[in-house]
Image: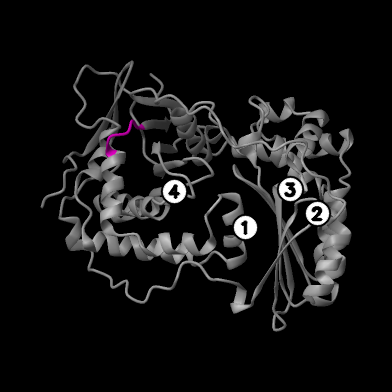
Amino acid sequence: MASSFPTTSKWKFATKHGNITFHAIFTMTFQDFVSRFSAICTIGLMSVLAVAPQGQPLRQENLLNGLRVLLWNDPAASSVSMKLRIHAGAAFDPQGKEGTMCLLADAFFPTNESREFFSDDLGGSLNIICNYDYIEIDATSKPESYLTLFETVGGAITNPQLDRQTTDALKAKLVTRLAADEKNATIAADLAVRRRLLGTFPYGRPVIGSSQSIKTVDFADLKIALDRLFGADNATLAVAGNFDANNGFRAIRRYFGSWLKSDKKVPSTFRMPDPPPAGTQILESPETGITEIRYAIRGVARNDKDFVAASILAKVIEQRIRSKAPAGQRDNVWAKSYSNVLPGVVVIGFSRIQREISAAVTGEKPKVEANDVVANALNEKVSDAEYAVAKNAVFAELNKTDAVTRWLDADTFKFASVKADQSAADSVTSADVQRLADQMRQQPVASVLLLTQKTSD
């Protein structure tokens, strides 16, 4: 069956001002996609989720303050790993003060000296993760230093040194980073299409804020977020590695037992966004000569039964569009499903296109409208070959996630259980992917084009 993509040597986009002609980015070739891929046997795929690290038994405890504790003792391990996850992220940033939660995350270990302690003194590492859904402190140490590891992290959490001077220093550091990010066309396009699709809905706003929003955040905002969301009853602590579980749990009770509960539980419920505006939004690229194109549609939540199906579908879309692009441009084409506590997004991107773009307003009817790219990529039935290739790619990525993280994900995203999440992933079929494709084809699409406007001579 022939591909449904139109044959053209140039793309045109409809805007409220007229038509934008996008010259000679891709020269489409139209062979049947199925002929490009042979079926890949998926029998024997590794299970997506492991029960515990290296098969070690899991010990589950709860402190009186509500902190959930997960312990895996592995005498063969060469280190001890602690992951402390607070189940609230940038989605809870006040509107206009985006970046608040990530600033607060950095405030627990605000200086280079406090972070280097983990490597210099404990023989380990420290990494802090801040995203829409959670904040996580990942710290490691040598086995003989695990009690100091617990004491150090526990002290920072239960008695944070949060003051105006620290807040101002963190803001200045983040504004410097954002100033560089905002000159990057790829980052600008990713944020623009989310904003186009979701508006002021939390997932349509930048995780770490903007140079403007950070300037509005003050010490009081961090203190409010700390009291409201950083409570022991809104967190899970997971420890794995070479340590004595009984002594370790006693130390956790000592160093984390004084951590207070949150002021009140805050459910992650927000008003769902309106449909995106029709047509392609044209924006000036922050990088001269670099063009970026994005399309986005609403996706699924992380605990949705279609989570894995959405990831597979995104891979199918990516394969289909890449197969139409010349070899030199294929790495610039991508599609990805982003799932969160609430339904996320599926994004299709054309990145780092270094071609001259002629922005000429004409009266000619466009041959390819922006939303057609998504519709055309979803029109054909998902073949067995496409499904096999995409499923292998998705499962390969899922298998990179360690078992401790999957248990933490179960708490953040409210799975029925880790085993149930595994079963849902293993049971996905090509029919599930096709059903999801049919649903997404009916959804409105947000589209954004970043380019350098051609100036008249």
**Disc 1 marks which amino acid?**
Leu
Between marks 2 and 4 in the image, the one whose residue lies nearer the viewer: 2
> Label 1: few (<14), some or many (≥20) within 10 Å?
many
Query: What residue would you read off at disc 3?
Result: 233
Q: Is residue 313 above or below residue 15?
A: below
Q: Which residues are magenta?
A: 441-445
- The residue positioned 22% from the left and 68% from the top of the image is 38
Q: Nearer the viewer, residue 420 or 15?
A: 420
Between marks 2 and 3 in the image, the one whose residue lies nearer the viewer: 2
- The residue positioned 75% from the left and 54% from the top of the image is 67
First of labels 2, 1 by sequence position: 2
Query: What residue would you read off at disc 1?
Result: 408
Q: Nearer the viewer, residue 15 or 126?
A: 126
Q: Is disc 4 placed on a helix, strand or loop?
A: loop
Separation of marks 2 and 4 at Cα, in angstroms: 31 Å
**Disc 3 marks which amino acid?**
Asp
Q: Is residue 52 above or below residue 258?
A: below
Query: What residue would you read off at disc 4?
Result: 304
Query: What residue would you read off at disc 2?
Result: 64
> Label 3: few (<14), some or many (≥20) within 10 Å?
many
User: Would residue 421 be visible to someone looking at this image?
Assistant: yes
Which percent across, then down, holds residue 306? 39, 50
Q: Is disc 2 placed on a helix, strand or loop?
A: loop
First of labels 2, 4 by sequence position: 2
Separation of marks 3 and 1 at Cα, in angstroms: 14 Å
Count of labels shown? 4
Q: Is residue 160 above or below residue 239?
A: above
First of labels 3, 1 by sequence position: 3
First of labels 4, 1 by sequence position: 4
**Disc 4 marks which amino acid?**
Asp
